[in-house]
Amino acid sequence: MLYRKDFKNISAQNTVTVTSYKKGSSDYVYVGGFGNIDVYSLDKEGMLTPISNHELYKQKGPARGMVADNINGTDFLFVANKYGNVIETFKILDNGSIERVALVEDTEDTHLAVAITLQVVHMKNASYLFVGGLEDTPGLSCFKIQDDGKLTHVQSMKDDDKLHTDGIIGMYVHKIKGKTFLYTSGFQDNGVSSFRIYDDGTFKNVNNISDNTKDRFLTGAYPVTGVTLGDNNYVIVGHRHHKYYKRSGFIKKTDFVYHGDAVSVFKVNKKGALVPHSILKDDENTKLQGQTRIEVVSVDNNEAVIAVGTRDDEAIQLCKLSEAGVLTPINYLETGFSIYYGLRSHKIEDTNFLIAGSFRFDFGKVATYRVAPKIEREGKVLRHIVNLKYKEEASQKQIDEAVNIFLELKNKIPEIADIEWGVNDSTEGHSDGFTHCFTLTFNDEHAREIYLFHKAHLDLISKVGPIIGGVLVMDYWTKK
């Protein structure tokens, strides 16, 4: 199960991409949105501490694709500035903060316009950065990473009727018996492609698999990840079906057929080609609608735990992948916000975390979750106690309005099972100035998360915040 540990405000308008990096004994989180990148440290309890924020080139963005890696002893953060049409290289400093050291703009020979996805590939004598985007002339590009972070163009392959590189939103690399293979999703052309990468950074197409209505779900192919279990190499592909997009003209091929939501598992054969293997279909017990990110949480005893972030179900679905390549749902948490590419798995010591953010412009936060054994809540409810004190200059009319706004949440957020309130009547002298107490009841973890990040609750904080002099919040589980 997932248990939220912390959440922090970001300086950008929203969260599009989240990545993380371990530098020495410290762990850092990088959150990209429209216009800038926020940097945080992450401790072993899952708590975030803000470090710095940095403007993107031309204050554009969003920072859609982000990947951190070490190149010949130097730590770098590579950023795909989507609407800036550039790839930015930042050096990661000793305190986790970043400074820009290089910039590559789009040209007629590359495919950097509306850049979305980045993948670092380490070969024998050099490291390379692969770039995919969503543009009028899509394709896949490779750049050699120099020791100072600068990028040198190696090869670009223009999309055609066979390749699935129109809107590369997911990429993954497998190294199999001395050979390196790259796998891409094609959001606009509804499929996945395989590529062989050579030591000099050049690459060639191996095979391509398109969507159908029988044994795969690739309409709007989106997140891609992979894992090796025993002697088997798997690639896991999700999709945000085109039916979820309302913008006129955004989807190029409008003759798609909606045949449900599912996660597709492909097995890699000896030639590095993908072979359809299994699927996990969405049903009333899973949250797989609008998959935008898939992360491998852990691998143990030839089984993997993966997390699927969803934009339309607004949830994180945990699944188990067996050595035989079969996905089984474990549990999910309704996060209360849509996940739009912003999901990252990170391990500190023996603890697995997920870091998530939302594309919502009214949200502006990044949250951390611990992945831990499920706590049994059968027959219990959650009490959420909010104690408030108001500023001396707040009028009684303002206080009464604040109370009414709080109580109105029950009508706007159905996940609130009950709400009651009262004015402090204690005569013991230990109230510390708190005057109003609100007790909300939730039936499960999902309800609390939905309430916490619900637009109505965020609006309440915005409206009432200026007159609040103090807040004390406590939650506890109790029998119904």
Image: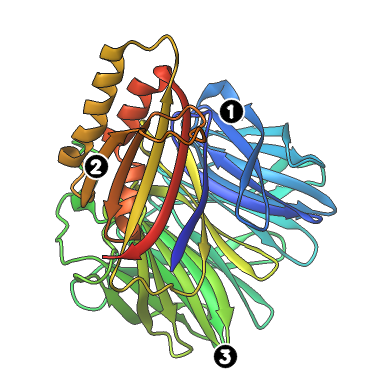
**Crowd tier of the residue under label 2, counting other residues whose Cα lies within 10 Å: few below 14, some 14–19, many 20 or above:** few
Alpha carbon of mark 2 to alpha carbon of mark 1: how far? 46 Å
Residue 264 seen in the figure: yes
Q: Which mark is residue 70?
A: none
The residue that appears at 21% across and 27% down in the rendered structure is 404
Q: Nearer the viewer, mark 2 or mark 1?
A: 2
The residue that appears at 61% across and 45% down in the rendered structure is 48
Q: Nearer the viewer, residue 51 or 452?
A: 452
The residue that appears at 40% across and 23% down in the rendered structure is 465
**Crowd tier of the residue under label 1, counting other residues whose Cα lies within 10 Å: few below 14, some 14–19, many 20 or above:** many
- Name the kind of residue labelled 2 in the image: Glu
Q: Is residue 282 left or right of residue 427?
A: left
In the image, residue 419 lies at what x, y percent? 23, 44
In the image, residue 227 lies at what x, y percent? 54, 76
Q: Is residue 315 left or right of residue 158?
A: left
Q: Is residue 272 above or below residue 116?
A: below
- Name the kind of residue labelled 1 in the image: Leu
Q: Is residue 149 left or right of residue 300?
A: right
Callout 2 secondary element: strand
Q: Nearer the viewer, mark 2 or mark 3?
A: 2
What's the coloring here? rainbow
In the image, residue 379 lies at what x, y percent? 28, 72
The residue at which mark 3 appears reads as 231
Q: Counting residues from the N terminus, which is met first, the one under dot 3 or under dot 1?
A: 1
Alpha carbon of mark 2 to alpha carbon of mark 3: how far? 58 Å
Callout 3 secondary element: loop
The residue at which mark 2 appears reads as 420
Residue 155 seen in the figure: no
Q: Counting residues from the N terminus, which is met first, the one under dot 2 or under dot 3?
A: 3
